[in-house]
Structure formats: C-alpha cells, structure tokens
Image: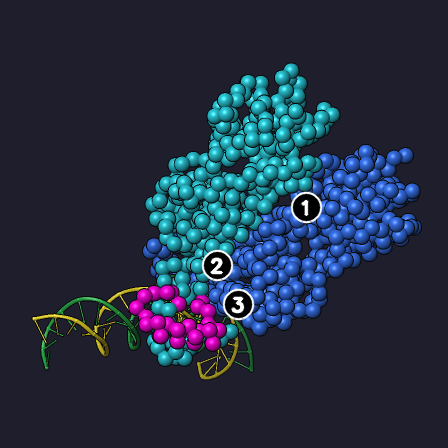
Chain colours: A blue, B cyan, C yellow, D green
Amino acid sequence: MASVTIYDVAARADVSIKTVSRVMNSEPNVRQETRDRVLAAAEALGYHPNLSARSLAGSKSFVIAAFVDAALTMDHWRSERGADYLSRIQLGATTACREAGYHFMVELIDHATPRVRQEVGNLLAALHPDGVLLTPPSADDVVVLELLASTGTPFVRLGPENAAGGGLRFPTDDRAAAGKMTEHLVGLGHKKIAIILGEPRYAASRARREGFLAAMAEHGLSVPETWIQQGDFTFSSGVEAAEALLSLADRPTAIFASNDDMALGAMAAIAEAGLSTPEDISVAGFDDSSGGRFSRPQLTTMRQPLVEMAAFAAKSLIEGAVPVDCDQDVDADHLPASDLVVRRSTAPPRA
Amino acid sequence: MASVTIYDVAARADVSIKTVSRVMNSEPNVRQETRDRVLAAAEALGYHPNLSARSLAGSKSFVIAAFVDAALTMDHWRSERGADYLSRIQLGATTACREAGYHFMVELIDHATPRVRQEVGNLLAALHPDGVLLTPPSADDVVVLELLASTGTPFVRLGPENAAGGGLRFPTDDRAAAGKMTEHLVGLGHKKIAIILGEPRYAASRARREGFLAAMAEHGLSVPETWIQQGDFTFSSGVEAAEALLSLADRPTAIFASNDDMALGAMAAIAEAGLSTPEDISVAGFDDSSGGRFSRPQLTTMRQPLVEMAAFAAKSLIEGAVPVDCDQDVDADHLPASDLVVRRSTAPPRA
DNA sequence: CAGATCAACGAAAGCGCGTTCGAACCCATG
DNA sequence: CATGGGTTCGAACGCGCTTTCGTTGATCTG
C-alpha cells in the first residue's frame, strides 16, 4: 500500500508532524504561512489522513452510525414509512458527514431477536461511533437506549414515540402537518371533510387526528362522528373506511387518510363505486410513500423532511452539540416542517 | 471510555495477548482448552476488539464500502430502478458483513461533479476498504474504476454496462429473466404477445428484447414487427406504445413492457380505451419498482435478486475471493436468478 | 531591563491491536 | 540419550496518528 503518511507531509513542508496534525484538524496556533505550506505539501503528495489511525490515537472515531430496523427495511412497502426512507436519511446524513470528514454508517438491526443487546453492544464497542441516529422503532427500543447511555454515546432520536429515554429528540410534527393538509383541503373550498384514522397505538395517529380536528374547528367546520373512520394504516382498512363513508347519506367531499396506503385504498373504493377522484371526492394521504407517486391519480400527500432532519441530526452529533446526558427536544426552529406535496388527487369540490 | 482491552482478556485467561489475538481471529495452533479459556474470559469481560486498532495494526480494515450514485438516490422514483434499491443492497451486504465481523458503509457519490476523483480518492485513502461494491452507474465510471485499480482495492460491479474496467462483474440476467417472463405469459396460454422496448442505449434493453424473442421463437410463436414497439423506459412512452398496439387490427392479448413504468403506462392506455387488465389484455412489467405494487391491478413483474447479489458480493470481497486484478464475470451458478413476481396484471387470455 | 505572558512549534509517549521471530515444548526416531 | 521435526506460545516492535508536555522566541508589563 505504502500510503503517504503525515511524516511525508511534515518533511516536505519542513515542519514537525504535530504541526501537520494541527493544520489537518484546523487547530489554532499555526501561522497562516505555515498552514499554507503544509496544505500545499499535503495536496502535492495526495495525503489523506488514515481514519483508523486518527480514531485510535484520538478520542473521536469520525463515524456516525444509524440504527435502522431490518424488518422495516425489508417490508417497508407494507409499512407506514415510504420506501425511500433509508435513501433519504442516507442522503442527508452522508452529506453532512462528508463536509466534516466524517463517515456515515447504517446498521440494520433486528429488534425481534433477543440478540439485540449483543449485536448493538458489539457494534458500539467495535465502532465507538461519535454519535448514533435512531429511527423508529429503534428510537424507542429500551435496550438500545440503555446501551447507548451506558457507553456514553450521544444520540438523536427521529420520531420517538416516547419522550423517556434521553437523547436529542426530533419529534415528528404530525399535528402541524395534519393541520397543513387540512388547510389545503379547506383552501380548495371543501367543508365536508372526513378522516381515516391510523393504528391508534401509534402516537402519530393520534397527533394527525388532533391536527385535523383542530384545523377544522379553527375554520368553524364541524366533523360528525360518522366522518371519523378508524383504520390501521393498511390498504384494505382504507378501502373499508371509504366504503363506509360512501354509504353515508351525507357524504363528505374530501377524505383525509392518515397515511398513503389507506389513501390508495380509499381511491380504490371510490373507483369501485363508480365515482372518480378528485372530481367526485378529493383524497389526501400522508407520508409520501412511493405508491402515491404512481397512483392514478397521483396522490396529494405530506412529506417528512427526512433529508434535512438527518442532515441536521448528523451535524449536531458531529459538532458535539448533543451531550452524553442530553434529554430534550430539538429547538423548534431547527425542526424543519413537513412539506405539502400537491398532486392530482385533490381538487375543489363540485359546485 | 476505559474499554476492556486484549491485555485484560490475556491476564484473565492467563495467556499472552498473542494467543488472545489468535483466538479472536480463528487462527490455528491453539489448543482447544486454551481457546475455550480465552473465549470465556472475553465473554466475561465483555471484550470486543477495537476496529480501528485492528485495521491499523493489521492489513485488513474490516470495511466494505458501496459507491452509489447520489442523484439516483434522490430521484430514484423516476429511474428505472426500484425505490428500495438501496435498502435491499444494504440488507444483503450488511447481513453478509456482520457474520464476518465486517462493516458495510455506503457512500453516495455525485458522478456529475468534477470532484469525483478527489472525493473517491479521499474515501479510499481514509477508509482503506477491503472491498468496494459498485452499482450502476458507478459500475461504469472510469474515474472510479481507475482509482480502485490504482489503490489496489478489490471490487465487484453490479450490473455493469461494459465488461471493460476489471473487477468481479455481476451481470444482470436480463436475457434469462425476460425469457422467464415470456414463459409465464406463454404458460398462461398467450400466443399473441407484444413487447415494449426500453431505451436502446442500455444494454439491459437489448438483452430483454433478445430474451423475449428467443423464448417466443422457442415456442414457435411469431412476433410481427408491429408488436415490437419502441419505448424509452418512461410512463408516457408506455402509454404511446400501448395506444399504437391497441389500434392494430390484429391486437396482441398480452404486452410485455421492458420496465414497470412503461407497463403502468400501458395499463393506463388500456383503461383509457375502455378495456381492462388483465381481462382483455395482460400486462407484464420488469424491475419490481414500487409503483407496480400499488397499481390497480397490481403488476406482474420481474425482481432482481438484489439482496442475494449484494450478500454474495460482500461475502466474496470479505473472503478475499476477488483478487486485486480480477477481471471476470461471477460464476454463473453463483449469480442468483431474477424472481418472477406474479400479481394481478396477467391472466389467461379470453377464450 | 528583569520578569511574565503568550503564540508557534517540536519531541516523545502512547492508542489497541497484528506481526515477526524466536523460544519452549511435545513426541518419535536412531 | 541425543537429534529432529512439528506444535504451541510470548516478547517486542510498529501501524499512523493525537496528545501531553515541553521549548523557543516574541511581545508586553512596571
């Protein structure tokens, strides 16, 4: 291999290796002239510090790891999350890491097996990551949380169900996002809007429900009980809920489904009933899962700003902005809001 | 941190650190009794060898990296590849790596910028990965290929367009897969099958065409020129091709689209014409992109065995089965075949 | 001008492990 | 008993870097 070392650079710049190290780490107390000389030497030699050596000698490992559920990754098309969930996190985190000379590593962990403790412990001990990014459901896995705390690894939690467990939390803004979608429908002129709720044991379901109801109330719009249908985040539950809605004497003109799969189900039921979306009934989803991008019509939905969240999370971890004993939500002004993705499934109601 | 080191284990097992090292690396020349004693000590102490120290001292880095196109990751829903492309590779590779105590790291690289050379060079120098996994279009990037060769890093290429460039190549089995799909349609009873070709500059398009024609010929089925429509992998080209097909006096009873987007377009055109899939015309796609999973009807398609391929690729790299100057295709019997995913869009032709 | 302070840099000591090389031990043979 | 080959083990060195702890000279005080 014979890679170029810090000694080579030091020799060429005619300084000690310590000075080269100082320059490479942007430390103070180096004259600008010296700094330039070192940089030039490094450039000329094609020098890149060895990651392993840096982490062995120093206190940082230059690695940010993400723990993502393996089962979720395999079955994500059946899950609430979009299929590109991993890709977007990877993009945001990798970008932030590269700028700082860090590396992002995603570790798939299977929360179903009892070996989680051993696997995660192993990863933590071998990698000594400078920070860990937790996604649902890892963000609420007590074993993982405990291991992280005991090894003194700073961590952030994306969309935690539970505040307990420490770390820097990035709560999903489901409530606000649901409100935003409701505003969109109301803005289109809809007054009779139904909602299909998600699996109630998820906090997200409850938050979306609340956001919807609050926004409706704010506009003085009432929502009869019959327009609030229970679903469970699956396509078929969306079909059933929509069928129930269609059979009503007083039909809503728009349906807000708590996720995309159910929205797709609702559109299918509407088509089945000989009606069309959005002409007869508008349908809105939530999550921007990939299914909605190719549906006919394409689905209007809310997209979580995952790329930005992952980037900010990684950046916080890298900058040491997340102390080991951190236990708080991220500042509200740093939590990017979900984007409303308006496509074809929503339109003004029939006059 | 005060992590437990190899010295602690050595002391507890009453052997030298070299012996502990031998045990941890499964080297020979250690009595079974000694081995057990060391293992017990390590277990009791919760010892995990430090990755950085291992890679610094030894010749292996225990890291397998994948270079994936960043733009593709962002826009994958518009691409030929499925949205879960990254997830599946991650799953396969991570699994294979974990079994061997290795770590898998995906690096997003933007082939559009001129800084590719610097970024990739940096990654290679800093990480010293024991092997690299290249996916399209990285698998055909000459800069990347050259850098890999010059640093002496073994690499495998998934779905390369070009044989030139070295490495262990995992050619896509488009030809065979297209044949398999054709068999499926013929097996259903179809005799009049049309094909919508993909963008001709991709080798995959040509291979799928050949696989289809060969399978048809094998069954003594003829394919008139008018049943061979040119497309370009986009939804709209699928619509147009299908419209042309539907206007024919002698209509096919099944359409084999060279990818899912075009298949979706074909189904849309069929619906537009007042016909239905699969009752009037069967439609088959290719790639198992996520759009087809939620379409109505759900699309019959071919799925590339990405998980298995990535796992085998990682394993080959780890086992050192890929020499630095490797320049060949993987053994045919190790190349997992694409899976036929039969869903609702294909059925026997009307009697 | 003595003394104190501070910026700029360097020498040497590890970080935790793999590796090299030789020492110690075993049993079988002459 | 001496010799030999194979097996099993350990001391010491070094991977490429960060750190700690100087050392030097320059600038600042009273």
Can the viewer see residue A278? no
Position of residue D2 relative to residue A232, above or below, is below
| Mark pair 1, 2: CA separation | 29 Å
Residue B62 on the magenta span: no
Residues at discs 1 and 3 in contact (Cβ within 8 Å): no
Residue beneath disc 3: A118
Name, please, the residue furthest toward the top: B249
Magenta stretch encompasses residue B45: yes
Question: Is residue B224 found left or right of B97 in the rendered image?
Answer: right
Q: Would residue B62 be seen by someone viewing this image from the given angle?
A: yes
Give the residue at x 60% y 38%.
B342
Q: Amino acid at mark 1?
A: Ser
Q: Position of residue A323 (x, y in %)?
A: 61, 69
| Disc on res. B98 | 2
Q: Quadrant of the C terminus of chain B?
A: top right
Same chain? Circles 1 and 3:
yes
| Corner quadrant of residue B253 | top right
Q: Residue at x 65, y 58 (%)?
A: A136
What percent of the width, then of the height, locates residue B1? 51, 74
Do pointers 2 and 3 mark residues of a single chain? Answer: no
Q: Which residue is mark 1?
A: A289
Mark 3: few/some/many CA within 10 Å (<14, 14-19, 20+): few
Q: Residue at x 50, y 25 (%)?
A: B219
